Image (cartoon, helix red, strand yellow):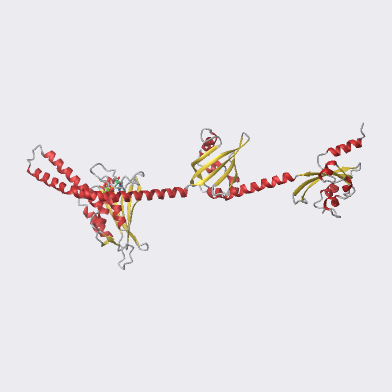
Amino acid sequence: MKTPDVWKTRLFDCLSVPTLILKPNRVVVDVNTNFLEKFRCNKKDVVGKTCHDFFYNSVEPCPLETCALAKVLADRRGHSDLRYTTTNAGLEKWDNRVFSPILDDAGEVQYVVECIHDVTQLKLLERELSGAKEFTQKLIESSTTAIIAADLQGKILTMNPAAEELTGYSLKEAHERITTKDLYPPGQAKKIMKILRDESLGGKGKLHLSTFTIVNAQGEEIPVELTAAIIYEGDQEAATVGLFNDLRDKLKQDEAMGELRRRIYRAEKMASLGHLAAGVAHEINNPLTGIIFYSDSLLQTLAPDDPRRRSLACIYEDAKRCGKIIKNLLAYSRQETPSEEILHVNTLLEHSLDLIRDRKFFMGIQIRKELSDEIMLIKGDRDQLGQVIVNLVMNAVDAMDHEGTLTLRTYRNKAAQKVYIEVADTGWGIPESDLPLIFDPFFTTKAPGKGTGLGLSTAYGIIKENQGRIWVKETSPSGTTFAVELPLYLPSGRGNNQP
Ligand SMILES: Nc1ncnc2c1ncn2[C@@H]1O[C@H](COP(=O)(O)OP(=O)(O)OP(=O)(O)O)[C@@H](O)[C@H]1O
Ligand SMILES: [Mg+2]
């Protein structure tokens, strides 16, 4: 049977951490085997010395505020401190020193046991982790993609500055005031979660690039490109993360590109059709004049009850219809060199109205003129510009079906040196799907024989040649307004209709 002291020594030695026993005056009374191995010393090198002498080669004890032993002596409880040192080889070392008091019967500290835990690996790992965490944090913060993470109840856990800008909420406001549901139109958050949980839609927990709408703090709907994922802890869903890219600029650019493409297409189509039209029109015009002349002459010679009259009348009418098409084609191809006259816009408008001699055409239509009485001069070809107005007026009247108001408006912007002509009707409007097509040659919604679809494309070409613009200013089922902008001619020669 061993004596209890032998057990104590064995117990002391079997501790797997270097351990010392100190007196309250900091003198070492014993160390365990593990200590001797770790510090590569003999007992005589350490026992009898103070801890500060052994560890730090110092005659003075460590400062009170950093010395855990001093705290143990003060309150007779266990304390620890973390010591950072560098080895002779320059390696970093962290020790967590745990001090525990051994009290006598009177409750006074008789000895202090100091266990030295080497936590260097842990500290290095911690540093690596916090470095990685810091890097990830910086990555998230500097990302121009908005990143929002939320728990499963939709409570916002974090969002980066790009997300703050996109949503209009600061991180604090988002934490306190909203959930992810508030960031979407009704029902959309639920739909996203459903897709995320559906394995057949891009894999479980994943939402690949999709287009959605979010609602910002001001209630505006913003189109976004969204990628989202569920964050799992083991098998359990823990949170969600969404990456949002604002699509507003991209959509604007796409729209501008689309418009540009449409314009190029229209210009190309107009140019090639112009050449073709001019050639064909000239070739057909002569024989057509003959058909009209001879069918008319023949008609005059036939008796009123002659059965051939009907067929002949058809030939005559159809030939005249072809003549109208040829006339439009020739106007469209505009082979003649335009003249350059100084024109008063209001006079041009009045003359153009006079060109539509058939008063029956305006039957049931009230004409309202809102013409500016300022002097508005423009430079251009009277016939061509007149033709633009005639077509706008005829289109407006056609859209009203003998009931409504036709408004003709002129005004100018002297500072911008522009003149404006507006033709407004109270007709049925232009459907949104037709809007990109109306200036295309041969686009017409009118019955066969009624429209050739060349009016607006001809007008477009003429106005463009005159450094102007023509566009649909307004259209709805209660009417349409076409606007034409032309350079104001200034007699001093400062007009911007100079090339
Ligand atoms: N004021 C308007 N209201 C409603 N639709 C219009 C109006 N102006 C033009 N449109 C639409 O634009 C189409 C093209 O007009 P455009 O003047 O080029 O040809 P058109 O009038 O059909 O034929 P054309 O002018 O050659 O006789 C029309 O068929 C019509 O659908
Ligand atoms: Mg027309």
Position above or below: 205 against 297:
above
- Please state the horizontal and vertical placement of residue 134, each as a whole percent of the image: 64, 48
- Please state the horizontal and vertical placement of residue 72, each as a whole percent of the image: 84, 47
Q: Quadrant of the C terminus?
A: bottom left
- Please state the horizontal and vertical placement of residue 451, each as a whole percent of the image: 25, 45
Position above or below: 343 against 239:
below
Most extreme residue toward the top, as rendered?
A: 1
Determine the image quadrant of residue 308.
Answer: top left
Determine the image quadrant of residue 241.
Answer: top right
Q: Is residue 29 visible?
A: no
**Left of 429 or right of it: where is 319?**
left
Task: Pick the residue in front: 61 or 462.
Answer: 61
Q: How many numbered discs, if any?
A: 0
What residue is at 11 percent from the left and 45 percent from the top? 294
- Please state the horizontal and vertical placement of residue 127, each as a whole percent of the image: 69, 47
Q: Is residue 302 visible?
A: yes
Task: Pick the residue in front: 114 or 236.
Answer: 114
Most extreme residue toward the bottom, as rendered?
A: 492
Task: Pick the residue in front: 488 or 498.
Answer: 498
Task: Pick the residue in front: 146 or 92.
Answer: 92
What residue is at 75 percent from the left and 51 percent from the top? 90
Q: Quadrant of the N terminus?
A: top right
